[in-house]
Image (tube, rainbow, N blue to C red):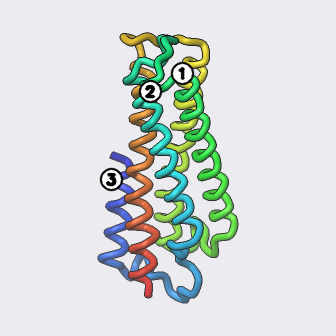
Amino acid sequence: MFFFGFFWSYFHNCLNPSVFVGTWPPYLFNGIVVDPFGLPLLNTVLLLSSGVSVTFCHYCVLSNVYLELWSPTRPSRTHLQWGYYFTLFYGILFLSFQISEYISSYISINSTVYGSVFFLLTGFHGFHVVLGLILLSVSLLRVDYTMFSDFQHLGLECSIWYWHFVDVVWLFLYFFVYWYGYYIAW
């Protein structure tokens, strides 16, 4: 519900700018909006790649790989662990690129309404990425210590579904804040 409210604020200020809160796009706009084909596109590719690797983890879970029964037709527990490692790597790389984007940005959270909503949406999403990485790390530790069975793996599935939620929210952010925000400015 928070994301719905934050997107509502973004679209309200974008589609119905007011004199009291500033213009949209911001006055003296040169270079303020981030180019969607640079670092944001790379971040999108990273999160979509992490979505693919965590989907492979979900496939491994549904194949009951934690039972330690090896079969040439289904993945092993090592495949599940490597899927988690790739997902965590992509997530950490995403966060590091997001931080570098914040550092190199020409706007701040208190410069314009656009800056406030931009940092609110991307920062709140970044918080969810950190939370998702923690949940996936806990699930990976539980996989390492074989704490799952074919009947008890709800935490594992919930962490995977949460990561998919993070991916979907990022797609909305990319298309509406970066891509749409860039083209409405010009």
Amino acid type shown at disc 1: Arg
**Amino acid, disc 2:** Cys
Question: Can you tell which of label 2 and label 3 is closer to the viewer?
Answer: 2
Task: Identify the secondary structure beneath mark 1.
Answer: helix
Instruction: Give x and y (percent) for residue 35.
Output: 54, 76
Residue 177 x %, y %? 43, 67
Q: Mark 2 points at which residue?
A: 60
**Residue type (three-letter) at the residue carrying disc 3:** Phe
Of callouts 2 and 3, which one flags the residue occurring earlier in the amino acid sequence? 3
Q: Is residue 57 above or below residue 184?
A: above
Question: Where does label 1 land, which residue?
Answer: 77
Is 174 on the left-hand or right-hand side of 108?
left
Query: Which one is closest to the eye, mark 3 or mark 1?
Result: 1
Disc 3 residue crowd, few under 14, some 14–19, many 20+, Cα 10 Å? few
154 over 103 or under it: above or below: above
State how far apart marks 3 and 1 are (Cα): 38 Å
